[in-house]
Amino acid sequence: MNKNNLELATTRARMLAFVIDDFLITFIIIAIYWSNITASGNDLVSILIVMNEFVWQILILKFIYQSFFVWYYGATIGKIITKIRIIDYNDLGSVSLSNSLVRSMLRIISEMFFYIGFIFAFFTEGRQTFHDKLARTLVVNV
């Protein structure tokens, strides 16, 4: 990556990456808990009840997925597909493990509170969300 030609990722690319990642996590959760889901019945309410029983496991999976991929690859699978990545705000290099963990935790909190933290991206110079701001990260094109 050429640090002189950094370009912030578009909101569209970030939203598409978010959707891809959420579908991937959902697919993994359904695969893991398939027997519980099918045993509960075929209606949507039964499926939602089963999913609520495993909310902590879902949150932990999201936390691990986001933390690991951002730290190790600089991007989640959704971000890799959309050709964007996360970098350290200060030195424009790779994100440290500690910043990756902070970003992941704050991202989950933002999701839990009606995605309020994501709205920050529309009002900050670097299009940083709440979790990007506090973890000192930027999302850029590859």
Image (cartoon, rainbow, N blue to C red):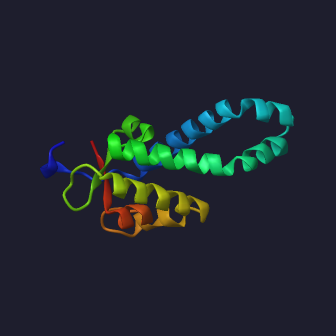
Can residue 42 be seen?
no
* Residue drawn at the location 80% of the way across and 47% of the way down: 49
Residue lying farthest bottom?
123
The quarter of the picture where residue 28 lies is top right
Instruction: Say whether residue 29 is left or right of residue 142.
Output: right
The picture places residue 85, in percent across and down from the top left corner, at 32, 45
The picture places residue 10, in percent across and down from the top left corner, at 36, 51
Task: Give the vertical position of 121 relative to 54 (above or below).
Answer: below
* Residue drawn at the location 44% of the way across and 67% of the way down: 120
Can residue 134 be seen?
yes
Between residue 9 and residue 105, name the one nearer to us.
105
* Residue drawn at the location 60% of the way across and 65% of the way down: 113
| Quarter of the image with the N terminus in it | top left
Instruction: Say whether residue 64 is left or right of residue 45.
Output: left
Task: Give the vertical position of 30 relative to 17 (above or below).
Answer: above
Instruction: Say whether residue 93 is left or right of residue 70.
Output: left
* Residue drawn at the location 75% of the way across and 48% of the way down: 53
Residue lying farthest left?
4
The picture places residue 103, in percent across and down from the top left corner, at 42, 58
Between residue 84 and residue 90, name the one nearer to us.
90
Numbered marks: total: 0
Task: Give the vertical position of 135 relative to 83 (above or below).
Answer: below
| Quarter of the image with the C terminus in it | top left
The picture places residue 69, in percent across and down from the top left corner, at 40, 42
